[in-house]
């Protein structure tokens, strides 16, 4: 089976995922506020500081999500390269599909040992013209690794 041809993709959070995250965040913050209100009504119970902290964390995550910069993924036919949208520095690594529900994929970019993986959300509306090509590239077989020349020489 052939590998996918070289291509470049820009992953930007589309409108649908942002609306979904906003709705889930609002639901979580509302639940935390309701829990805090119930706890405050019952004297002697645990303080509502936990609920307030949870609501603040949800709000901070929502704000961070809305300010995420787009990333650029480049597939050269054998290796993935990740760069911020400005494309200044590319980092080589491996890209794996973790969740695929059709118009949305959760991807994990591994830059190598000792580096935390980067989780990427790819939505059809954020990769409009290249959605099919991105799906082909992430699912295409990787080229077979060629043995290192030093290993071949050591075998002789």
Image (cartoon, rainbow, N blue to C red):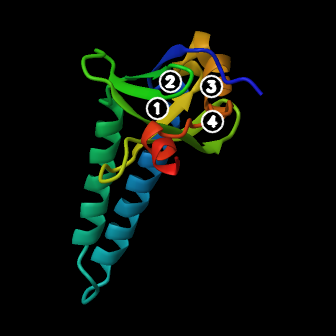
Q: Which residue is mark 2?
A: 15
- Please state which of the two labelled residues, at mark 2 or mark 4, is closer to the viewer: 4
Query: SS at mark 1?
Result: helix
Instruction: Using the image as rendered, state which of residue 76 and residue 101 is in the foreground.
Output: 76
Q: Which residue is mark 3?
A: 137
- Please say if the residues under marks 2 and 1 sit with CB atoms less than 8 Å apart: yes
Badge 3 or badge 1: first in the primary sequence: 1
Q: Which mark is residue 53?
A: none
- Please state which of the two labelled residues, at mark 3 or mark 1, is closer to the viewer: 3
Q: CA distance from mark 3 to mark 1?
A: 25 Å
Q: CA distance from mark 3 to mark 4?
A: 15 Å
- Please say if the residues under marks 1 and 4 sit with CB atoms less than 8 Å apart: no
- Please state which of the two labelled residues, at mark 3 or mark 4, is closer to the viewer: 4
Q: CA distance from mark 2 to mark 3?
A: 24 Å
Q: Which residue is mark 1?
A: 18
Q: CA distance from mark 2 to mark 4?
A: 38 Å
- Please say if the residues under marks 2 and 4 sit with CB atoms less than 8 Å apart: no
Query: Residue 71: x and y, percent?
Result: 38, 24
**125 displayed left or right of 100:** left
Residue 22 in view in this figure: no
């Amino acid at each position: 089976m052939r590998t996918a041809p070289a291509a470049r993709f820009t992953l930007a959070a589309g409108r649908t995922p942002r609306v979904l995250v906003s709705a889930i965040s609002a639901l979580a913050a509302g639940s935390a506020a309701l829990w805090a209100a119930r706890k405050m009504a019952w004297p002697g119970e645990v303080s509502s500081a936990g609920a307030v902290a949870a609501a603040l964390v949800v709000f901070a995550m929502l704000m961070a999500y809305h300010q995420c910069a787009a990333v650029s993924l480049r597939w050269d036919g054998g290796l993935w390269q990740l760069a911020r949208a400005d494309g200044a520095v590319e980092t080589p690594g491996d890209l794996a599909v973790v969740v695929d529900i059709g118009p949305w994929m959760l991807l994990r970019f591994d830059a190598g040992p000792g580096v935390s993986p980067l989780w990427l959300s790819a939505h059809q509306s954020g990769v409009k013209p290249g959605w099919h090509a991105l799906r082909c590239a992430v699912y295409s077989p990787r080229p077979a690794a060629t043995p290192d020349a030093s290993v071949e020489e050591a075998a002789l």
